[in-house]
Amino acid sequence: MTNEESPNLSSFDDESLNKAFAALEQQARDDASSLDSPDAVEAFRLRWTGRKQGRLNDVSSRWLKAAPSEARKSVGERFKTLKDLVEGLLEQAAGSGPTDATLAAEAIDITLPGTRRLTGAEHPITRTLNEIVSVFAALGYSVGVGPEVETDYYNFESMNFPPGHPARDTQDTLVIANQEKRGLRERLLLRTHTSPVQMRTMERQPPPVRIVIPGKVHRNDAADATHSPIFHQVEGLCVDTNITFSDLKGTLDHAMKALFGSAVKTRFFPSFFPFTEPSADVQISCIFCGGKGCRKCKNSGWIELLGCGMVDPAVFAFAAEKQPAYDPKKISGFAFGMGVERIAMMKYGISEIGQFYAGDMRFLGQFA
């Protein structure tokens, strides 16, 4: 578009100014009357308000700046009227000027209550798992993860489960089909504990190691009030020089107090696990009766909660195949494992493990 120059004014009296500005106003109305497309509106905007070729810019340069001092006020007032007219015509043509009806329709009644947005919450299993992990994280433990589909080697052999051990039987372990052609070590199964991550961690890094391993595990168990074929564990491993059973007892006693309250007591009973020696079952004083004896603790005052023990030297021997630093003559360590669902059931007074997996919002909504 070429620049349209306005004629120079030879006189700045009121009559001359009225006549000149009236002509421009009429021209603007005529131009605006034929705006029937977005392109036409844009052309109108450039013609009248463009910085370089705009008529308003030209009028300002030729008339307003050239006016004598005594006439500048009159020219300025008429120029503002012209500018307001052009902007109004442009706004009307662009359809951006909201009508009273539009404003009324878009009005917000601030006296109405706001729309309530439902807030999500952690599943009780996730919440309990995070609580357990946070206790050990505060003690300097890192978090380890690993695959749920494991090899026989990492799930059993490296954890000192010899061939023929009852846990390897398909009646206890969920195995992947059509693995017969593989060597025993390479056969795939759904991990029965998170212990394989202990071995994978030791193979990757030399001692010292302090790690907790939360995750889902699978066992061929019939579902009932306290058992499920799928559940969650948190296992822990601590390896360094001069680690003793006293370190294990102190660590777990602190963890149980952090989870259930400072009044909780712990006690250890001899037990057996293939990957620890010596091994122990850990009991805590009943959180429901304070150790006095009730139906939930079978009137004993104690509740069995987890297993633990000193890492068996045979497990270190497997790790030493890739990390020679795990020499059982130079280092020692302890391991422990606990079921997340069992702890969640105790903390929240849940009697049926199946409620965790049923997806019933009436049940889950209690934890929001």
Image (cartoon, grey):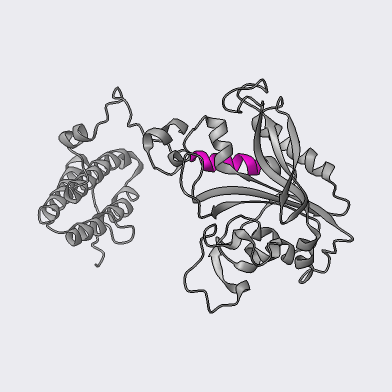
Does residue 130 belong to the magenta stretch?
yes
Relative image position of residue 252 (x, y in whole percent): 74, 39
The answer to which of 172 and 211 lies nearer the viewer is 172
Q: Quadrant of residue 263?
A: top right
Q: Quadrant of residue 194?
A: bottom right
Q: Is residue 7 visible?
A: no
Q: Is residue 37 left or right of residue 358?
A: left
The answer to which of 109 and 64 lies nearer the viewer is 109
Relative image position of residue 2 (x, y in whole percent): 25, 67
Q: Is residue 286 left or right of residue 28?
A: right
Q: Is residue 179 above or below residue 87?
A: below
Q: Quadrant of residue 182?
A: bottom right
Q: Is residue 95 above or below residue 302?
A: below
Q: What's the residue at 44%, 30% (across, down)?
A: 366
Does residue 367 belong to the magenta stretch?
no
Q: How would you classify the magenta stretch by its main secondary structure?
A: helix
Quarter holding the C terminus is top left
Q: What's the residue at 41%, 34% (across, down)?
A: 363
Q: Which residues are magenta?
A: 122-134
Relative image position of residue 310 (x, y in whole percent): 79, 51
Q: What's the residue at 63%, 24% (across, down)?
A: 299
